[in-house]
Image (spheres, rainbow, N blue to C red):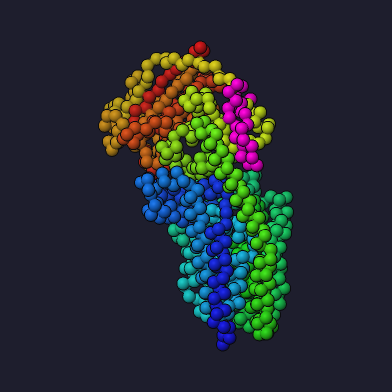
Amino acid sequence: MNKEPVFARYFLLFLPLVFLWAGLNFSRSNYPNDPEYIYLMNALCICDVQSVGHIDNPGTTLMQIGAATIAVKHFFSNPENDTIVTQALKNPDLYIESTRKVIVVLNTILLVLMGWIGYRKSRSVWTALLLQVSMFLSAYILEITWAKLSPEPLLFFMTGLFAVLIFCYYHEKDREKWKYVVLFALISGAGLATKATFLPLVFLPLFILPTFKRKVSYLLGIVPAFVLFTIPAVPEYDRMFAWFSNMITHNGIYGTGEKGIIDWNKFFPAIRSILTFFSGFTALLACAIPILATSFYFRKNENVKRDITFLAGLVATSVVGILLVAKHYGGNHYLIPVLLLSGIFIYLELKTIEHIGKNKPLQKFLLPFVVITSAGFISWSYPSALTICNKQYKEASAEIDSANLWLEKNYKNYTRINYYIYSLNKYTGLKFGTDFAKGQMYLHLKKTFPDTYFYELSSNSFINWNLKTYLQDIIETNGNKIILVNGPSDSTQVAEIARNGFPLKKVYSGNSQNLYILDTLKYVAPPKEKLVQVGETIDFSVDGFSKEQKKFFGSNNQSFGNISGLSMEYAHSGIYSIKLEKSNPFAVDYPLSNLKAGELYQIEVWRKSDTSSGCLVVSADDSKDYYQAQSEAIKYDKNGWELLRIIVDVKQEVEEKKLKVYLWNPRRRTAYFDDLSIKKFEHIPR
């Protein structure tokens, strides 16, 4: 009979409310490129009815929640009547913060559910509190859960659901119910779709499900569950499986390094680091060994037999988790799913001790002792650590805001060039995220923020979103009032940038923010060369074809390859275009021969595609000798056609080689091409 007072149950709301209050009020850094903008831009791909481009985690569940948050916020608040994508691009950090708070609320609901089900199944407030408190057993996990938009906060939710299901199954009298097979498969599929670090938990049901048939059905059920939760990434399954294949077959982090399963020189030190960092969990795992050994002698007891099955499964799951993380040891957050099963771990150890000793008084005092001790440790040690983290996030954001205000006040009329990838502002974040979304948002970015520039020191290149440009071109277009946003603090890097032709003068210095203007007194414009067109422009309209010869012909009567993908659905001029799709990815084959150093070829083609699918390519027979592919447009017309351009500047290493021009659409989305032109120029010094 339950002798706990009714009001004691209300304590089960205390931790969820503390979690909600702290999570909603916890600070985060403004404009963190990695990983928050990756998930924002891939969520926007979903809003734009495109497949996602980031498949490494896979992380699709987080992208789906992000897309839903963006859609709801856009529906209820759109004062400028922007499209859903444009509105999010204009204020990206707002949507990142909104999604973060949605996940905080989801995790709060999870904690309430844990308390309610824990009490309902055990009729013990202490047991329910143990399940809740166990989700607070690491300040490190709480910081990540509150301050980041990443898969880990969602893994908090997925692993919590998994723990609740294990708890319910432990108390289930009829363990052969098929509903548990289905629920375990669904949660495992969702967990794996969130992040591959959920994989160790997949092994646990194989220990506790009762029959071979149910175990196999569970494993088979994970497949459709995984597909269900990775629908936005289905077109990218080939890349996803290649990624995970490399993770398995290479011994470096993220599937890099040499071929081989394990680098033994790093493997054992990584295990030691993991066990040392999570010393409490290590102690918990160590305690399970003598408990299991002792319980083996009481295995004829049905309760003890059940305890052995569940506890052995948890030990095996934990060991697998540690070994997998140690193989590609890149951070302790990869072990979060295993760590969040600590509450179930503690509960099963206590229940096993109870069933072995048949000691009710021990149970009566041991469980409250564990809960009170854990709560006391959390109350004593966490607030100061989390307060420091919160302060650091606030200070970092305040400095970014302060630098931006100073910049707006003093250099408002200067053309900004963002130091990529180190600038912390929305433009760098948007570019970084789009690079991890297969560039699918560049069309929207160019339309929303057309005059946005970046400088990348590693390649010494200036970029207008993803189109290469030159400092001289930026100056000619915008004037010589140029400011480099968040440039390097390292003076050697500043000197290197100057040697590359971009001399800088510091005008603002902070802990993480450094602003430089172009030193116009030291800047020397590169000598200009005059380009003179040689010969006539070679035009190729898709309407120029011969049915008899089954070939395309250009204005010079040369062949542009066999007729392929002829379509009357759209046309830039005339009535025909070339339609490229999955079943027909290539068209056009035009040779560029007798190349001479000093020549320059400008090749352009018009494309119609809703998703920037399809590209213009110039390549040598051996692509290692020469290869250029362009999928990003430089110009648009009112009918939705985009102009692609490639410049072939013939150098000595390319001279006399034979290049070919062709069209290629490697994606599954359809692209139409029309009106290709080739112009030949020669450099003439002024």
Q: In this view of the protein, can residue 230 be seen by the observer?
A: no
As for residue 517 lying within the magenta part, the answer is: yes
> Measured from the top left, where is residue 418 in percent x and y?
55, 35
Rendered position, 614 above or below 47: above
Residue nearest the observer in this picture, 643 or 444: 444
Residue nearest the observer in this picture, 202 or 611: 611
Rendered position, 445 above or below 620: below
Give the mark count.
0
In the rendered structure, the answer to whether residue 290 lies left or right of residue 564 reads right
Q: Which residues are magenta?
A: 499-522
Report the residue that reaches farthest toward the front. 409
Residue nearest the observer in this picture, 460 or 233: 460
In the rendered structure, the answer to whether residue 425 lies left or right of residue 385 reads left
Q: Which residue is at 56% across, 38% downward?
A: 406
In the rendered structure, the answer to whether residue 343 lies left or right of residue 414 reads right
> Measured from the top left, where is residue 300 in percent x and y?
64, 82
Quadrant location, the N terminus: bottom right
As for residue 137 lying within the magenta part, the answer is: no
Q: Which residue is at 48% across, 15% downward?
A: 530
Residue nearest the observer in this picture, 89 or 594: 89
Report the residue that reaches farthest toward the bottom. 1
> Measured from the top left, where is residue 565 in percent x and y?
33, 36
Q: Which residue is at 60% across, 66% downward?
A: 135
> Measured from the top left, where is residue 655 in percent x and y?
52, 19
Q: Which residue is at 65% across, 73% downward?
A: 371
Q: In this view of the protein, can residue 481 be seen by the observer?
A: yes
